[in-house]
Image: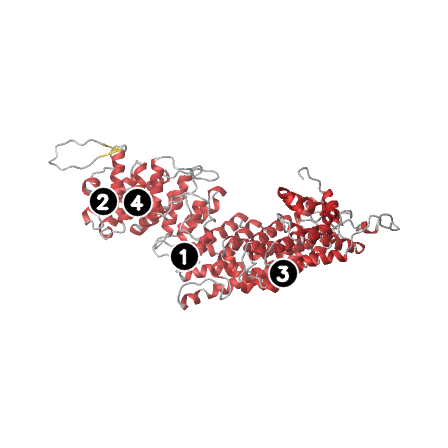
Amino acid sequence: NTRRLSGGFNPNSDPEGATMDVDEGDKTKVTALHWSYSLMANALLLFLVHPRLDDVEMSRLTSYVMSCLLGDLKVIRMPAACVLLMISRFESFERAGAPVVANVLSSQPGALATIVANLGLCHSVGDGAGGARGPQGRADALVQAAENLYGAGSDMSGKPWPRTRACDDHVPVGSFVVACARLFGLFARVAPRVVCDELEAPLSRLAFADGDRGARCAAAEAVAGVLASRSPPRWAAPLLLRAFDEAANDSTEEWLRAVRYAARGGESPGAGCEPLLSALSSPVCRATATVSQQARRLEAALMCVAELAAPPVSDASIAFQESFMDELLASGESSPLANPSRATREEAARLAAQLIGAHGGDDEDSPTHGDGVGAHERFAGLRAKANALLAQFVECAPDACRESLERQPSDARHLDGGNPGDPGVVDMDLDHAQDPVTTKGGSHGFTAPEGRGMHWLEGSFLTVIQLAKHGGVANVAGAVAKMLPFVLRVQECPDREFALVAKRTLTYLKYLVFPRRHLARAVAGTLEGMRDSGQWHARAAGLKFCQAFSYRHSFTLDIPEMAALRDETFDRLCDAQIEVRSLARDTLVGFLKGVGTANAAAAGIRARCLAAAAEQPPRKRGRPENPGGGSAGDRLDPSGGGRDTPDEDAKAARHGCVLGLSACVLSAPYDVPEWMPEVLEELSRRANEPNPVKDTVRRTFSEFKKTHQDAWAETRAAFTSEQWETISMGMELAPSYIV
């Protein structure tokens, strides 16, 4: 029975065994038991202990469990911790169990330090990347079982605790055992004075133990449990933040999870740990703080916001979030989003995305907090500040775009061999590509307002990326749609790292589904990028975006909106830049295949392509020579940028009509519709024109032969003999070893 299982463990006996009391009338001699029997006894206690234990039994059981935590048997420590957490919920624990725990912790010297060290040995972790190993034996399996029973409902190396959609991937896999944190929270509740006086020294030593990550994990759990208690000691929050600041890059997950556990509060969820929140909200001195310290402060704040963004939360928790919103909205480079360090900007963007995703958006888009009017009013300040930050993103984007396109980054100046003291400016007229011209005389080119230039724009782009990754962008789709033209405009700029961020932003926006009320703004932004007269890269990016955008919104776009996208794509077939013309052909193929179009609309596009081709009759082989030598149609731009000169506008138009015909052919890869022979005939007549027309004809016929080769006899039967003879010239441009 329970009395016999829990009665006779002697912590001073042989560490490899345990003894049990027997009745005095029992003449049978009982020898020391194997550790496996003690393990079985602890396991049975989980099922045999009755919730209504009397005070005597509760006292005996609590004493036995504490002896297991202080003993030398590793395999019974975690089951003992589970027993103590379970019986702490029983009615008799406060009367009979809590005094025993307090007495053991106060009477035995170094009891708390021994428990922390013993639990550290139960962690199967090691220094280095990844940090955690798989289960190594029975003891590790018991650690996982303890976390399943009294942790987060997941094993110790699973998702961060507690699970929230917005922050599941902010913290890598680690070994923060929530059951251990709750155990130390229990100690802080029943023996607050002992914890305050005796736990600081061992935790300060173990938190910085070099080469012993298990000890550091146990220290993180202990300080998190103490901070989550009702009255945390003053040393706990500074110790946690200092340990996190000084941790190696591959050993921070246990401290981040400790911050998350402490931030929510153990006994009253949502109350927040005021000492921790106060320490984090205090601004750092940028003159003395390192980049790592600034970035890690924002990372720790993100963990707190992830726990406190949704109700129930205290007024202190709301004030904590508002303080960081004020910091993000600060003028100049005081805002971490405009910090010169990219690492700081990235962490600030994650924090901004968490706050905007939780509180931003208009009345229809913003998430609801609670069911009552009072809850809505409590978050009104946060909602206003989140929307103000979004408004700043849009308002400052034009000047920031101009600065990012005109100013040469410092790293590019050094690579170009320029004087590091000379700022220099690069002429970025990408439609007239030429060698970068660095202006002397100290000119900085265009400069945006302080703190709202390229760094700020990069911070806003990183925020949009984080919102898109975690689903929060749906609440602020209107602001994102207004930023779309600026994202398209800076796809290519002198700072290659910034350009990469802009490309990542556009990639995430391709998969965003805009609500119907924001589609008009998104269409206008896409068209603005496709019509950008100063940046051909913006026109190319707009066409790429249009491909995904029109497909994902093919059932929600209005007929005029879809027609506007098709018409602009058709106009781009005659663009001055050949790369834009080729992308327009690929985009038009999507419209012809049925993206947001009916048969009548597709027929209209083909008719426009044939009409454009009729206006540009094929050239004859003999062309008059111009006075400078060479044919008039082959004259190149003397700037060497590859763009058609005014004398070559006709060449762009001729190439555009051929690209339109090519799009018609490529839109039907496996059959021969009734309109196909006429289009192929028109293409074949242009087989002898100079490049790039000839190359486009060759590639089109090559693709046609490749996709129709499996049914070549049926394909040929769809043409009359005259039609087949006409297209033979185009077929000869694309030789095939199969047909």
- Residue 559 locus on image (x, y percent): 60, 63
Locate the C terminus and report the quarter of the image it occupies: top right
The spot of residue 713 in percent (x, y) is 65, 43
Please, what secondary structure does the residue beneath circle 1 have? helix
Amino acid under disc 2: Leu
- Residue 603 or 559: which is nearer the viewer? 603
* Secondary element type, mark 4: helix
> Residue placed at 31% from the left, 48% from the top?
194
State which mark lies toward you, 3 or 4.
3
Mark in front: 1 vs 2: 2
Horizontal side of residue 385 vs 705, given as left or right? left
Total labels drawn: 4
Q: Which residue is mark 1?
A: 274
* Mark 1–mark 2 distance (CA, rounded to whole Å): 40 Å
How far from the left and from the top, in percent, is residue 142?
Answer: 33, 40
Q: Is the N terminus in the top left, top right, bottom left or bottom right quadrant?
A: top left
Residue 600's label in the rendered image is 3
Label 2 secondary element: helix
- Percent position of residue 265, x then y: 37, 54
Three-letter amino acid code at the position of disc 4: Cys
Q: Residues within 10 Å of mark 1 (few under 14, many from 20)?
A: many
Residue density around tag 3, few if under 14, some if 14–19, many if 20 or more, within 10 Å: few
Q: Disc 2 vs disc 4: Cβ atoms closer than 8 Å?
A: no
Question: Which residue is tagged 4?
Answer: 82
Q: Is residue 221 above or below residue 455?
A: above
Which residue, given by chain and number where applicable, does mark 2 sit on?
Answer: 48
From the viewer's perspective, tell me whether residue 209 is left or right of residue 649: left
Tell me which corner region of the image, top left, top right, bottom left or bottom right, holds residue 596.
bottom right
